[in-house]
Image (tube, rainbow, N blue to C red):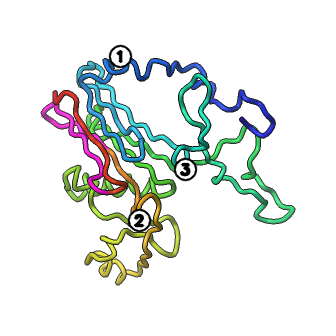
Amino acid sequence: MTSDGDERRALDPLLERLDTYGIGRRQFAKLLAGSAVALGAAGALTGVGRRDNARGNAVAYTLTIEQTGGSAITVPNRGFLLNNELTDFDFAPSTPGGPAPNLPGPGKRPRSSIAPTMLLRDGKPYLVIGSPGGATIITTVLQTLVNRLELGMTLPDAIATPRVSQRNAANTEAEPAFLDSPDRAALERLGHRFVLAPKAFTPIPEIGAVEALEFLDDGRVQAAAEPVRRGGGSAMVVTPQ
């Protein structure tokens, strides 16, 4: 509900027409049959690749509700949580008396860095990837894609490799394993400066939590998720082909 008490603004008009009642019922289980699913530790469904569908459909989906559990308010009869994205707004003008377009208000939607990504090869799904992580999402997805496509890593290795996140700042955030690697010294000689990434969901600083699918040349689908970050993700293929 927005500050003026207008409940109609709580939902996107398209979502208001979405029937979520049957999502946990037999029909949804039947829909997933013959699919590959990568489910992250943060609860973000990254991809569903339906190999039994002649159209070759795939889905990249990242859930963003800010804190775990969002605002802890569930929309009646809809079955999903409202977000707690007010932290993306400013609560006072940056300049007293100046313009303040980022103040919270009715009808405004917070910005987000979610980056569910789908790569096509010859017009068909090749990679489906996504991650939670706020402002680090875009760099996490990009680094994983570079690892897989440019550096030739396998998809599991591309996900597991230590990460950094540079977001137009003087310093680059990095995971402990990267700070202990030879790559740090090589980049510092080029002028880069690294700092330890802040702690988020675990005692050890981590960046992102990738889940991904790769559509292989032999018709199979490889599902991969984090082996360690945020306690590890879950990736599975219901039917190999």
> Tag 2: residue type?
Pro
Q: Residues within 10 Å of mark 1 (few under 14, many from 20)?
A: few
The residue carrying pointer 2 sits among few (fewer than 14), some (14 to 19) or many (20 or more) residues within 10 Å by Cα, namely few
Could you tell me which quadrant the C terminus lies in? top left
Of the two numbered discs 3 and 1 on the same chain, state the one appearing first in sequence: 1
Residue that label 3 marks: 67
The question of residue 225 being in magenta is answered with: yes
Upstream in sequence: badge 1 or badge 2: 1
Q: Which mark is residue 203?
A: 2
In the displayed structure, would residue 86 be above or below residue 182? above
Q: Nearer the viewer, residue 31 or 126?
A: 31
Residue closest to the eye, 217 or 66: 66
Q: Secondary structure at mark 2?
A: loop
Residue 37 location, x and y as percent? 30, 34
Residue extending farthest to the left is 218
Asked if residue 125 is positioned above or below residue 190 in the image, the reply reads above
Instruction: Identify the magenta region.
Output: 212-228
- Residue 48 within the magenta-colored segment of the rendering: no
